[in-house]
Image (cartoon, rainbow, N blue to C red):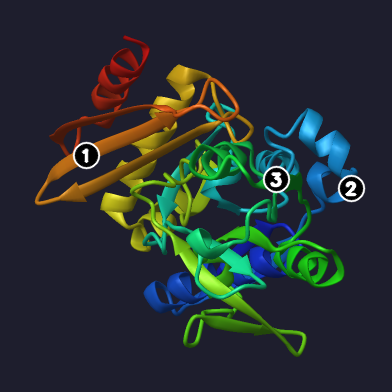
Amino acid sequence: MTTKIILGTRGSELARAQARLVEKAIQAARPDAGIETRLVTTQGDKVGPLERQAGRKGVFTAEIERALLAGDVDIAVHSAKDLPSETNSDAEIAAVLPRAAIDDMLVSKHPGGFASLPKGAVVATGSVRRKHQLLWKRADLKVVDLRGNVPTRLRKLLENDWDAVVLAHAGLARLGLSPAHDKITFESSQFFIGILPHEIFLPAGGQGIIALQVRADDQTMKAIAALVNDRETLLCLRAERGFLRLLQGDCDCPVGVLATIDNDMMKLRAQLFTDQSAAPRQGEVEGTHDEGERLAERLLLRLRA
């Protein structure tokens, strides 16, 4: 008998592309599954940019989680970095796909990358973390607010007298906008692309990760999600979310955090900004791959010391 699975996701082009990746992964593991994707309009899709900025936590995920708990969908598909560090106890992140690129990218009207931006250049971003990182390295920049999905943000770069925008590498790649010779083409226009190295521009917790959320008591969907789970990515996500939970910081908090695993050893790094243009507090801890929560506690103590 065919197993029917309803995926729930936002209606943005990127969200639908991510849902297709989940569908493809599940279909490969369970060819007998009948998979449908249901689009859910979230608060972040309905309100204006100022309202989003005032209460950003969960604005792109809460309605999808509610649809999951109501039984309208079986698996909620999220960009992990959009999920608040505290979610409903009746739902859980059961699986993640392998992590994509973690870096941020500068999409610019000028060649040469970040260092070659003209003095006083205008750079747009919707992320408080990115704003602090940009001004930390280039206090001369003028950083302006930017909202909307990826195509909207690129269109705004075309339409405004801005020099560049900052976007996630993973999102560009999933939309087929991977750079060719350090350039991308969008609506017949070309932009220059430069990676902002994660060693300096530490990403948001969960960046590059697609999360599969299921009802906590749904053993069938847990088993299906487990078939496509990337264990190391999930361990890293738990460590990053554990750190954010202890910090009580989500996507509007000026913090970058990244967990990596090499030979069963986990390294957890974080940057915490406490002043708009000042250098961040930075720290790094290491331990075994399965002690992410303990590493998160140690790292927070180090940053607050």
Quadrant (top left/top right/bottom left/bottom right) for the C terminus: top left
Tell me the amino acid under the disc marked 3.
Val
Report the residue marked by disc 3: 143
Q: How far separated are the C-alphas under marks 2 and 1?
A: 38 Å
Q: Compared to 187, does 30 lie above or below?
A: above
Task: Using the image, tell me which numbered label, if any, was put on residue 46.
Answer: 2
Snapshot quadrant of residue 254: top right
Q: How far separated are the C-alphas under marks 3 and 1?
A: 31 Å
Mark 2 crowdedness (10 Å alpha carbons): few <14, some 14-19, many ≥20:
few
| Residue at left offset 58%, top offset 39% | 139
Disc nearest the viewer among 2 and 1: 1
Whether residue 269 is visible = yes
If you read the primary sequence from the N terminus, does the residue marked by circle 3 or circle 2 appear first?
A: 2
Snapshot quadrant of residue 160: bottom right
Image position, residue 21 (x, y; %): 52, 72
Q: How far separated are the C-alphas under marks 3 and 2?
A: 25 Å
Report the residue marked by disc 1: 267
Tell me the amino acid under the disc marked 1.
Lys
Q: Compared to 141, does 229 lie above or below?
A: below
Whether residue 34 is visible = no
If you read the primary sequence from the N terminus, does the residue marked by circle 2 or circle 1 appear first?
A: 2
Mark 1 crowdedness (10 Å alpha carbons): few <14, some 14-19, many ≥20:
many
| Residue at left offset 16%, top offset 33% | 286
Tell me the amino acid under the disc marked 2.
Lys
Q: Secondary structure at mark 1?
A: strand
Image position, residue 59 (x, y; %): 74, 39
Q: Secondary structure at mark 2?
A: helix
62 or 264, which lies in front?
A: 264
